Structures are given as structure tokens and as C-alpha cells.
Image (cartoon, coloured by chain):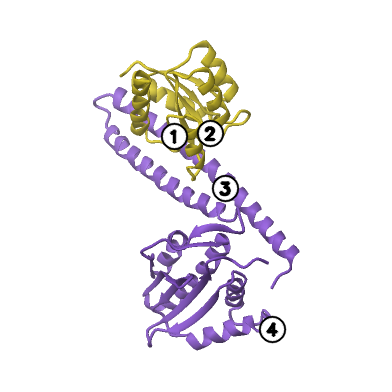
């Protein structure tokens, strides 16, 4: 566990990264708005003033909507970046775990696509409102998604993220169809949470950091094997992050 | 509905220049201002029917300019432009009396539609 100063310093550093990223995303949106209006004006002028026998006109006319489409696509990406950047604004805030899981699943889609693995969020039917740290929750969920993707990669199978309520706790269940590694995962996590902690010599030291982060969030990590066909990582979050 | 006047306020010169030209091609009378102070000066000279106002500008912010316009020109409708992913500023602007808000980059047809509704609202107001 980290001390008060380290904790405060980490919060401030994250807020700094978030502020700069949010500022940059705002700038990118302004640039996109200029491209959007400039190409729109080009289209307006072409429609109004292009000579009838100008051979390039049909081709130019077809390029304009394609540029506009890419501007809108970029605007959606920038919006995601902006929301992600703002997730580090406050160390504790009220959030809907369903929404957060959908957001982080969208952010992880590109990594899944590159590995040829399917990735799907399955939100709970009702909102899963908790008071916690959105940035660190996203970090933990992303870490377990990434590990699920790596396990699924050779056979290009699938990772799913199911959200559920369990009494007064909220759960995110990351299920992968990769090689079963339940015992190994349990051992790594138990070692990280033991008094000896993480030495850095582990096979996957970040896995230990993920487990420790879950503990700091007042939650836990449970591992189940899905027969011989994969792994289930159950991330359990309390309704309210413990005060430190 | 054609023939109404618009004041376009944004510190991005290329954006206002291209957008104003597009609106003029559609028969709308357009004035431009590159900051809040310039916008308020133009409002004094010739109040438009609609102000398209960027929220984030150096100097006076869009929301500050909005408050002043609401106080001095209650007949003029204000549509805010926000470049941010969040709709927080837009919602705050509507609470302060903006007619509506649009998120950049804006679809021109959507902007025209909102402006027409804003002009109609002046008639009904």
C-alpha cells in the first residue's frame, strides 16, 4: 500500500495528464471543425460554379462526403479521448460501472482487432452506481482485458465483459476463451497480495499491480476456470471506495 | 425564413471565415467577430437575429458573453458552439438563456435548422 503523500502526488500527476490530454482533444476538435467547414465550402462552391464539362468534377464531388465522414469519425474518437482524459479529474466520483465498462471496451476494441480477437461488453440490466476512482477502475479492467486478449490470440477467440450486481457489491466478469491458466493467475495474485509483495522478478509483475490496485479500491479479484475452455476473472468492487 | 441575420463569434479565424461564406451562399446575412469584446461591439452597432457563439474563447468566455447579450438584447437568440466532448457547458448555457447548443464539428444542415427555429422563436417571443 502507498503512503498519503505518494497517493496525493499520484492523483495530482494523473489530473495533470488528464488536463493536458483534454486540452489537446479540444484543440483537435477545433482543427476538425475548420476542415469540416473548409471542405463543406469547397462542396458548396463546386456545386454552384463547376463548369458542366469539367471531367474531374464527379470525382471531386464524391471525395467531399468521404472527407466529411472521416471528420465525423475523428470527432467520435476525440470525444472518447476527451472522456478518458476527464476520468482522472477526480480520485473519487459517483459512476455507473455499466457505462465505464462499455467505454473501456470501446477503447480496447482496436487492440482486440489487431490480435484478431472478439471483444464484447454485456452490461447489467440496471445501472451499477458506485462511488470510486474511474481512472483506476479503467486501468484494472483494461489490464485484465489485455491479458484475456493475449490468451485468446492464438485461436482468435473471444473476450466478454459482463457486469452484474452481487448484494451491495458490483462485479465485472472478464471471461476469455484462451488457454486455462487459473492456478497460475491465482498464484501470481496471491503472491502480490502477500506481505512480501511484488519483487519485479515475477513473470507478469503488472498482474500483481492490478491485484494491488483492486485491493486499494476496496475490491478483490477472483479466478475461475471455465472448464478446459478459458478463464473467468471476477473483479468485485464495493459500493464505495474505502477512505484512506 | 431566408434573410435573417447572424453574428458568428469564434476565435478560430479560418473556421468563421469558411462558415460565414457557406451561410452567405445560403442567403443569410452574416457578420463575424473573433472574440467576445468584438462581438459585444458588433451587437451595439447592429443586433443580429441569431448569435452563434463559441463557448471557449480567450478573454471573455462564451458564457460570459451570453449573459451580457441576454441582459442587453433579449430579442436576440444565442446558439452556443462547444468544442468539448462533454455537453456540460452547453447545458449550463441553456440554463443561462441560450436557445440551444451545437457540438463542433457541426453539420451545416443541423445548424441551419436550429437557426430557423431560433428565428421562429423570436417571432413567438
Q: What subunit carries mark 4?
A: A
Instruction: State whether residue A215 is above or below residue B45.
Output: below
Q: Which chain is yellow?
A: B
Of badges 2 and 3, the one in the foreground is 2
Q: Which residue is mark 4?
A: A195
Residue at 45% over, 17% down: B48
Instruction: State whether residue A94 is above or below residue B43.
Output: below
Q: What subunit carries mark 3?
A: A
Foreground pick, A5 / A208? A5
Q: Which residue is mark 3?
A: A22
Marks 1 and 4, Cα distance to the nearest angstrom?
55 Å
Q: Residues within 10 Å of mark 2 (few under 14, many from 20)?
A: many
- First along the sequence among labels 4 and 3: 3
Residue at 46% over, 73% down: A167
Same subunit, labels 1 and 4: the answer reads no
- First along the sequence among labels 1 and 2: 2
* Tint applied to chain A in the drawing: purple
The reply to whether dot 4 and dot 2 touch (C-beta < 8 Å) is: no
Q: Which residue is mark 1?
A: B101
Q: Which mark is residue B55?
A: 2
Marks 1 and 2, Cα distance to the nearest angstrom?
10 Å
Determine the residue located farthest toward the top in the rendered image.
B45
Marks 2 and 3, Cα distance to the nearest angstrom?
15 Å
Find residue A204 and report its horizontal and vertical position in percent: 58, 79
Find residue A150 and report its horizontal and vertical position in percent: 46, 75
Marks 4 and 2, Cα distance to the nearest angstrom?
52 Å
Residue at 56% over, 52% down: A86
Secondary element type, mark 1: strand
Secondary element type, mark 4: loop
Amino acid at each position: 500500500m502507498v503512503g498519503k503523500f505518494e497517493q496525493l502526488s499520484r492523483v495530482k500527476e494523473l489530473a495533470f495528464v488528464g488536463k493536458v490530454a483534454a486540452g489537446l482533444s479540444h484543440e483537435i476538435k477545433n482543427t476538425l471543425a475548420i476542415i469540416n467547414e473548409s471542405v463543406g465550402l469547397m462542396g458548396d462552391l463546386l456545386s454552384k460554379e463547376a463548369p458542366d464539362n469539367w471531367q474531374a468534377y464527379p470525382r471531386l464531388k464524391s471525395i467531399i462526403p468521404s472527407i466529411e465522414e472521416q471528420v465525423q469519425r475523428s470527432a467520435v474518437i476525440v470525444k472518447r479521448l476527451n472522456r478518458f482524459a476527464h476520468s482522472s479529474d477526480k480520485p473519487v466520483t459517483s459512476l455507473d460501472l455499466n457505462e465505464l465498462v462499455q467505454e473501456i471496451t470501446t477503447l480496447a476494441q482496436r487492440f482486440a482487432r489487431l490480435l484478431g480477437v472478439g471483444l464484447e461488453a454485456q452490461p447489467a440490466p440496471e445501472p451499477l452506481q458506485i462511488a470510486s476512482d474511474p481512472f483506476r477502475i479503467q486501468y484494472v479492467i483494461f489490464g485484465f482485458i489485455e491479458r484475456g486478449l493475449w490468451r485468446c490470440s492464438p485461436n482468435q477467440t473471444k473476450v466478454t465483459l459482463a457486469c452484474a450486481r452481487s448484494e451491495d457489491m458490483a462485479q465485472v466478469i472478464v471471461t476469455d476463451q484462451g488457454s486455462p491458466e487459473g492456478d497460475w493467475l491465482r498464484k501470481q495474485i496471491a503472491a502480490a497480495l502477500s506481505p512480501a509483495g511484488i519483487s519485479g522478478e515475477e513473470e507478469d509483475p503488472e498482474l500483481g499491480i492490478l491485484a494491488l490496485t483492486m485491493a486499494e479500491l476496496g475490491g478483490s479479484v477472483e479466478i475461475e476456470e471455465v472448464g478446459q475452455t478459458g478463464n473467468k476473472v471476477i473483479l468485485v468492487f464495493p459500493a464505495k471506495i474505502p477512505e484512506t | 425564413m431566408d434573410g435573417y441575420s447572424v453574428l458568428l463569434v469564434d476565435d478560430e479565424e479560418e473556421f468563421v471565415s469558411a462558415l460565414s461564406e457557406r451561410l452567405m451562399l445560403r442567403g443569410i446575412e452574416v457578420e463575424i467577430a473573433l472574440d467576445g469584446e468584438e462581438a459585444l461591439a458588433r451587437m451595439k452597432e447592429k443586433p443580429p437575429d441569431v448569435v452563434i457563439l463559441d463557448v471557449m474563447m480567450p478573454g471573455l468566455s462564451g458564457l460570459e458573453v451570453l449573459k451580457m447579450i441576454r441582459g442587453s438584447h433579449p430579442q436576440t437568440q444565442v446558439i452556443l458552439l462547444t468544442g468539448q466532448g462533454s455537453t456540460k457547458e452547453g447545458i449550463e448555457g441553456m440554463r443561462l438563456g441560450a436557445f440551444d447548443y451545437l457540438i463542433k464539428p457541426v453539420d451545416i444542415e443541423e445548424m441551419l435548422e436550429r437557426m430557423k427555429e431560433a428565428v421562429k422563436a423570436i417571432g413567438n417571443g
